[in-house]
Each structure stands twice: as structure tokens, then as C-alpha cells.
Image (cartoon, rainbow, N blue to C red):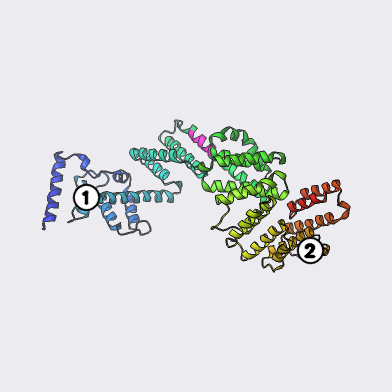
Amino acid sequence: MDIVKLLDHVGTIYYNISFFFHLRPLKAMFNSKILQILRGLSQEELKQFQQYILSPYFVSGRKRDEILSLFKLLKRHWPAFDHPSLAKDIVYRKLYPGELPVSSKLEKLMSRLLGHLRGFIIQQESELGRTTNDELLILMKYYRQRQLTNLLQISERKYEQELAQKKQFDLADYYLQFQREQQIVDDERNYNVYKTPRNLPHLLESLDDYFLISRLKYTVQMLALNQAVIPVETKDSLAMIQILLPIIEQRRHTIPLLNLYYLAYRLLTAAVDKQEQAFQALRDYLKQCENTTPPPIYSAMQTLVRNFCVDRWILGQPYFLDITFDVYREHLEAGYLYYQDKLLPATIGNIVQTGLHSRAYDWIRDFLEAHRDRIIGTAYPDNVYRYNLATYYLAIKDYDRALDCIYDAFDDSFYRIASRQLEIQVLYEMNAETLDARLDAFKIFIYRLTDEQCRVTRKEALSNFVDLLRQMRSTANWQRPKRVQKLKEKALSTKNLVARAWLLKMMDNLA
């Protein structure tokens, strides 16, 4: 027997004697959170945990053999774990025979084993289908069920600390709070089925928070889609919200996320004469809550604000004609509009149209040049650039350059159609002799477009554009304010109409 093994053997005998005669304090024993958890496992669960360690899916790396050796050493003394050979220095010598002690080496291995033990618990609870997605809540539930009071208290303090430090709450956080209160109530009921759980009021309050935020969030999504893309039946859903509104209005000031969705709801349901006030209220609140709102939610709300502006800008509502470009420029600077550091064609088009309406000509020209090579979402980025550049030239009345841009062939079908419309606008401002003939040709062109080439609503919008322009060309309407006013009212009330802002601007010149 070599000297190292002899010393190890003598050390073990000494620990056994000192433990028997209480010569060595118990705190020198191998005692940790690991043992507290292992005591609560059954023999079958210990076997399953060993298989968990052996699985490269769960435990990998060069330390796996050491972790397995430590577990096997501990498992021999289950469930009491009170044998003197579990003193840390004895455990160290058994794991690393013949090696000199290295500071914190065993502690790090114990920490790894504890981490995998927690992972095992989470995996087991997940397979039973009775857990949440929050690992700390899963462990708290497990500790509560196994009556591991000390570990439960430690975990609860950690949960409370994380909650207190958290500045941004999303819907999932409110759901986790509800689940935590539900765990406590369920456990109270398990211990005493005849006693009303003391935590029920907290449970109901957290459930109300989660329900109200969820209901309002998805109602806002439904209203936004209904206005922008997919018309859906909203009557029954809105009826439920009307019932809940008094409660929401009472609680929204103490729950920032509820207040955010409430203001969005008020905007989407506001009457036309109340939209400016509702819009400003939401926009102001977004500035206040930027640091307390999760980025995905904040970005989604800014998108809602931007889309609402554009929709009203298209409809020609005066307030939004002036403010939409400010919103776009603000969102561009904040980075909300970029995808992979590039812009979509529709985004570029909206910025150009609203910017030109606000007469920010130099800014738009610089913007187009800066983003010429930063266009995504199309196979023909040059088409996007040339069409919007032509729009810019039209706005500054450089008609020859505008025509030069659009007379070159467009590969993208959208811009091929849009360039024909833009040509009409240029010829109208030039008062070109060929305008009437081009209007007739454009009307036939629109009629021949298939549904695959152009959506029905866009065909209708283009056709309405031609009809209104023909009426504006009629000498019967020139210098007659009442007739011009009727044309404006028609332009504002027509649902599907392209270039509405431009048409209204041209009508001002008729009066």
C-alpha cells in the first residue's frame, strides 16, 4: 500500500472515531441542498436520476463521469445521509484519490450536480404535464409537495427578489403570478380540505389581472386586423369588453400593461372627432412607459400607432395628414422600421409619400439616397428606388426627370401599374395635350388587369382615381367652389382611392 492510500485509510478511521465520540462537529459533514433534495426522492426516482446523468442529451462534457461518481457515492447513504464518511475532505479523497486538495474543486462539482438535479426535477414534472414554463415555479411546487421547507423558503425569497427587480412585465409574467398563487392555494387545500385557503383573495386578484390584460390585448389585435387586413365579426367580443370596461378603468392606473392596451382600445374604437385626442393619449403614454414595457410589446404598439396614422392619412383626415410623417421619422430614428437593417418597399413608399406631403423635399431626397441599397422584401429593389425617386421629382415639379424615371421598364408588377398611374399625375400637372388619351388608355389597362395581376380593391381604387381626374378635367367644374367642394367630399368619402392626398391638393387649385 503506497503512502497516499495509507493516509487516506487512516483519515477515514479517524473520522469514524471522532464522529462516534462527538470529537468533530457535525457541520464538517457533507451537508448541502443536494442532500435535502435527494432525501425526498424515492428509490425509483434515484434510479431515474442516475439514468438522467448517463444520458448525453441531459448531461454532457468531460465532468460527467465525476458527477456520476459523486452521485453514486452519495446514493449509498440514502435516505439519512448521516454517515461520517460524507465529510467533504473524505468525499474529496474518494473522488480524487492520490490528488492534493484543490480549493473549491469539490464545491464546483457539487454545484454541477445540484444543477442537474434541478434539471431532472423540471424534466420529470414536465412529463407529468402539471408544470409551468418557469423553472423556479416548478422547483417551488416540487419543494412544497415534498415538504422541503428550507429550500422552498430560499426559492420564494429568490422569486420575490426577482419580481421586485423586474421592471418590465408582459402577459406571461402575470400568468406566472397567477400560477404561483394557484400553487399555494392548491397546497393549502391538500393539507386541510375543510379549511378555506387564506391565499384565495390573492389568487383571485392575480387571475383578474391576467384575464383583463389578456382579454384587452386580443381585442386590440382583433380590432387592428379588422381595420387593416381581415374584416371579422366583432360585435359579440366588443359586447363583453363593454361589460368589463368599468373594472378595467378602475384598475388600469395600477397595472401599466392594462393601461397601455386600454388606450389602444380607446383609439381603435374612437369616433372620428375623438380620434385625435385618443391618438395623442396613446402616443404620450408610450413615451412614459418605454422603460417599463417589454420591447416586443412596445414595438407592436408603435406599429399600431403608425398603421393607424397611415390609414387615416390615406383617408385624407386633416390631423393625420400633418402628423403621419413626424411619426414615421421618429420611428425611423428609433429603429422600429428596420428589418435586418433594411426597409420594406411599403415602408419606403409611406415615408416618401408622407414626407413629400409635408414638403420635406431635401430630407426625402437624402433618405432615398441613404437607403438605395437597403431595400428588402423584393427581387427588384431598383424598381422601388426609381418609382419613389419619380414621386419626389413630381413633388418638386421636375417633370422631365420624373418621366425619365418611370419610362424605363419596371419588372415588378406593382410598380409597373403604379408607374402608369404616376405618369397620369405628371401629365396632369404639366397640362399635357396627351393626358386625355393616356387616361383612356389607362382605364382600358385597368379593366384588362386580372385578379392575379392586381387585387380587386386596388383595381377599384385606380378606376376611381381616373374617374375623379376626368371630372376635375371638365371645364364645368373650374372656378366653381361649390362644385369643387362636392368633388372634395367625393374624394374623401370614396373608400378605395389611390393618390387621395394628391387629388385633394390638385382640387385646391381648381377653386
What residue appears at the point 63 percent right and 47 percent down from the top-left corner? Answer: 326
427 left or right of 480 in image: left
Q: Are marks 2 and 1 in contact (CB under 8 Å)?
A: no
Residue 455: which quarter of the image? bottom right
What residue appears at the point 25 percent right and 49 percent down from the top-left corner? Answer: 104
Segment colored magenta: 202-209
**Mark 1, other Cα within 10 Å: few <14 / some 14–19 / many ≥20:** some
SS assignment at label 2: helix
The reply to whether residue 504 is visible in this rendering is yes
Q: Is residue 66 above or below residue 322?
A: below
Check disc 1 and report the residue beneath it: 91
What residue appears at the point 59 percent right and 35 percent down from the top-left corner? Answer: 248
| Residue sitting nearer the eye, 56 or 484 | 484
Estimate the x, y position of residue 322 in percent, counting from the top left.
68, 46
Q: How far apart, in angstroms, are the residues tagged by discs 2 and 1?
A: 89 Å
Q: Which mark is residue 442?
A: 2
The reply to whether residue 229 is visible in this rendering is no
